[in-house]
């Protein structure tokens, strides 16, 4: 009887000591909180976010995401806008995107800013492929998921939940968005606004579990 | 106050405590693991499902010892103190099954149920939960990836359904949804047909807690010398245990129904000793 009681006491001391030690000496509490509790577990839900455009984790040829995208992803979703000179589609989309973020820049500028969209931060990067750096230019094929190799091209990189891990997830749109039934500037603006909202929702649902999140 | 009323109050309080995480109401999100089966995908969940942490600890050939030990230690701590009492006094799925138990008890009286309950195989079927714990929580996570969370009926009940109600049109079913829906339907049928059917046969958290009954301070003790084997206790037991012959049974959830039922008061809660 006494031996059994001693065993019970030893067990409770050992377990409580180990548990206390884990709390004191390891980041397990924060790991569980940020990696499991605060992230919306889509596996547990057996659901996928419903989005206007298809988001994917796989970049073209599984190339790594460019460093500048990952850096900006700590602020919010990244909106990459590829444009160029002498491009009719680009001329259509240029004012629509300026309206989307209420910003102003020249068509041949290199423009990068953390902009506010409905009280959320979005990293907006404008790339005129004829007036840009090799780093920004070389990122275009990485996100050219339909192998169009054309402009205008829009990529929204956000965060997604992939079987227990939070990773960058993106979608790419091409042209004047006619494939999505957008034929007027107003329709294009509404479409992009809705897609951005969805991207921000996905970002917020997964932000806590993103390894680069500080 | 009657013991079963106290247990109900405990279950209700702990149900609300487990659901203090809804944003703003009050939005308490902690880094603990629940010591029972509840899903962190529930919009109001405060903590993580212990199985999720265990799955993540062995995800696709990796091993993260912190995520492995943390839920085991939380469960172990309560397990050594109170054995599997968590299942009867705290678990929200236990509370749900308490609600469906009335129907299950009526089903239990049918000749077919009696016949099936008398089968020797029934007690071996209880090992299913250990097999599920090892195969679906550990082995598949290590070799393939998360499978249990993809089909978990408790996640469906506490996560999928509330999320779909609160966010209409925002989500679409994934590949596993139809399978999970069928399993969820079977789960509902099970808990209406068999009292504590989920706890008896399938709950992997129960499988983690069960062995602690062997060494826990709190346990149910039967005075076998004085027992007249009227079997009222066994009839009342929601886990279908042969109570007069029970000694620290891993299936016992310490609900205390046998304690209340014994006409000679020979069954008691004990705080220490064998």
Image: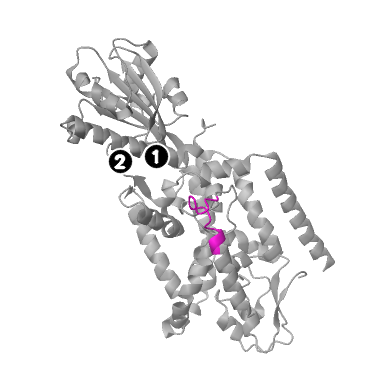
Counting residues from the N terminus, which is met first, the one under dot 2 or under dot 1?
2
Quadrant of the image containing the C terminus of chain A: top right
Instruction: For residue B25, say whether it is visible.
Output: yes
Cα–Cα span, label 2 and label 1: 10 Å
Which of the chains bears the disc numbered 1?
A
Estimate how packed mark 1 is, as few (under 14), some (14 to 19) or many (20 or more) residues with alpha carbons within 10 Å. many
Q: Which residues are magenta?
A: B15-28
Q: Going by the image, does A206 lie left or right of B174? A: right
Q: Is residue B214 above or below residue B143?
A: below
Q: Tags 2 and 1 in contact by the CB under 8 Å rule? A: yes
Q: Residue at x 47, y 82 (%)?
A: B114
Left or right, B85 with respect to A16, comes to: left
Residue A146 visible somewhere in the drawing: no
Which mark is on residue A51? Answer: 2
Q: Main secondary structure of the magenta part?
A: loop
Q: Residue B128 location, x and y as percent?
A: 51, 63
Q: Label for residue A202?
A: 1
Left or right: where does residue B266 sit relative to residue A151? right
């Amino acid at each position: 009887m006494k031996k059994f009681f001693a065993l019970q006491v030893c067990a409770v001391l050992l377990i409580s000591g180990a548990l206390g030690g884990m709390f004191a000496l390891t980041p397990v509490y924060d790991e569980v909180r940020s990696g499991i509790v605060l992230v919306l577990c889509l596996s547990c839900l057996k659901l996928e976010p419903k989005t206007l455009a298809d988001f994917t984790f796989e970049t073209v040829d599984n190339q790594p995401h460019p460093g500048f995208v990952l850096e900006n992803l700590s602020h919010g979703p990244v909106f990459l806008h590829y444009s160029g000179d002498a491009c009719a589609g680009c001329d259509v989309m240029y004012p629509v995107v300026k309206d989307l973020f209420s910003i102003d820049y020249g068509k041949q500028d290199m423009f990068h800013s953390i902009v506010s969209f409905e009280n959320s931060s979005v990293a907006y990067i404008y790339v005129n492929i004829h007036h840009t750096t090799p780093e920004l230019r070389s990122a275009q094929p990485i996100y050219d998921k339909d192998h169009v190799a054309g402009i205008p091209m829009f990529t929204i990189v956000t965060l997604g939940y992939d079987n227990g891990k939070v990773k960058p997830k993106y979608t790419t749109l091409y042209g004047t968005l006619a494939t999505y039934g957008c034929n007027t500037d107003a329709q294009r603006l509404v479409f992009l606004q809705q897609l951005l909202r969805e991207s921000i929702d996905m970002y917020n649902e997964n932000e806590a579990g993103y390894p680069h999140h500080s | 106050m009657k013991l079963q009323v106290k247990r109900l109050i405990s279950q209700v309080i702990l149900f609300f405590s487990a659901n203090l995480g809804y944003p703003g109401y009050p939005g308490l999100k902690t880094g603990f693991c629940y010591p029972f089966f509840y899903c962190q995908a529930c919009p109001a969940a405060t903590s993580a499902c212990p199985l999720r942490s265990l799955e993540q600890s062995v995800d696709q050939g990796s091993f993260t010892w912190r995520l492995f030990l943390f839920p085991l230690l939380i469960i172990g701590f309560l397990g050594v103190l109170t054995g599997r009492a968590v299942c009867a006094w705290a678990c929200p799925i236990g509370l749900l099954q308490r609600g469906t138990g009335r129907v299950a008890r009526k089903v239990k009286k049918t000749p077919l149920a009696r016949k099936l309950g008398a089968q020797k195989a029934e007690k071996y079927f209880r090992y299913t939960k250990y097999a599920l714990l090892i195969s679906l929580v550990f082995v598949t996570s290590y070799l393939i990836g998360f499978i249990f969370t993809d089909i978990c009926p408790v996640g469906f009940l506490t996560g999928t359904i509330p999320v779909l109600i609160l966010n209409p049109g925002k989500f679409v079913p994934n590949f596993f949804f139809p399978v999970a829906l069928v399993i969820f339907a079977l789960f509902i049928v099970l808990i209406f047909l068999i009292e504590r059917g989920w706890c008896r046969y399938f709950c992997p958290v129960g499988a983690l807690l069960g062995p602690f009954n062997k060494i826990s301070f709190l346990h149910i003790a039967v005075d076998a010398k004085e027992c007249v084997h009227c079997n009222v206790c066994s009839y009342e037991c929601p886990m279908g245990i042969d109570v007069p012959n029970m000694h620290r049974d891993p299936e016992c959830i310490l609900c205390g129904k046998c304690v209340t039922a014994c006409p000679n008061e020979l069954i008691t809660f004990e705080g220490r000793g064998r």
